[in-house]
Image (cartoon, rainbow, N blue to C red):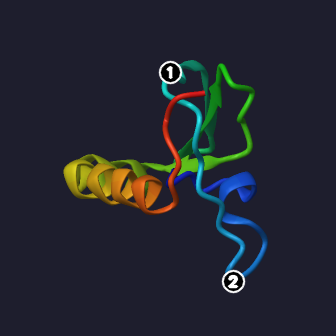
Amino acid sequence: MHSPSAEVQGHGPGQRQLVSGRRHVGITKVEPVGNYAVRLVFDDLHDTGIYSWTYLAEIGERQDQIWGDYLAELDAAGASRDP
């Protein structure tokens, strides 16, 4: 969805991927990255994102808007969270 990982964001403009088919994804590990971020390891083997404390606070504050935008984007693409 809004992961900062290269898997989702790509490596340049216009390469962002819409993540679908992943309704139940859990966090299996949280690894510190210095004093400024964490690396999250998910049970779907997605582990390439580094999440700064600032980024995590932002998505926490804007959760409803971000989630609504994601669901609308899935709907527009004819995609689903279901596998």
Which residue sits furthest front? 78
**On the picture, is 66 further left or further right than 43?**
left
Which residue sits furthest right? 11
Question: Which label belongs to residue 24?
Answer: 1
**On the picture, is 56 further left or further right than 18?**
left
Callout 2 secondary element: loop
Which residue sits furthest bottom? 13
Name the quadrant of the C terminus: top right
Q: Earlier in the sequence, mark 1 or mark 2?
A: 2
Work out whether residue 72 or residue 24 is closer to the camera in this orientation and state it: 72
Give the label, 1 or 2, closer to the camera. 1
Work out whether residue 15 or residue 82 is closer to the camera in this orientation and state it: 82
Callout 1 secondary element: loop
- Please, is residue 32 above or below residue 76 in the view? above
Residue where numbered disc 2 is placed: 13
**On the picture, is 67 further left or further right than 1?**
left
Residue found at x 78% / y 71%: 11
Q: Tell me how many marks there are.
A: 2
x and y percentages locating residue 31 in the rendered image: 63, 29
Marks 1 and 2, how far apart in space? 29 Å
Residue found at x 62% / y 44%: 34
Q: Label 2 sits on what residue type?
A: Pro
Q: Label 1 sits on what residue type?
A: His
- Please, is residue 14 above or below residue 31 in the view? below
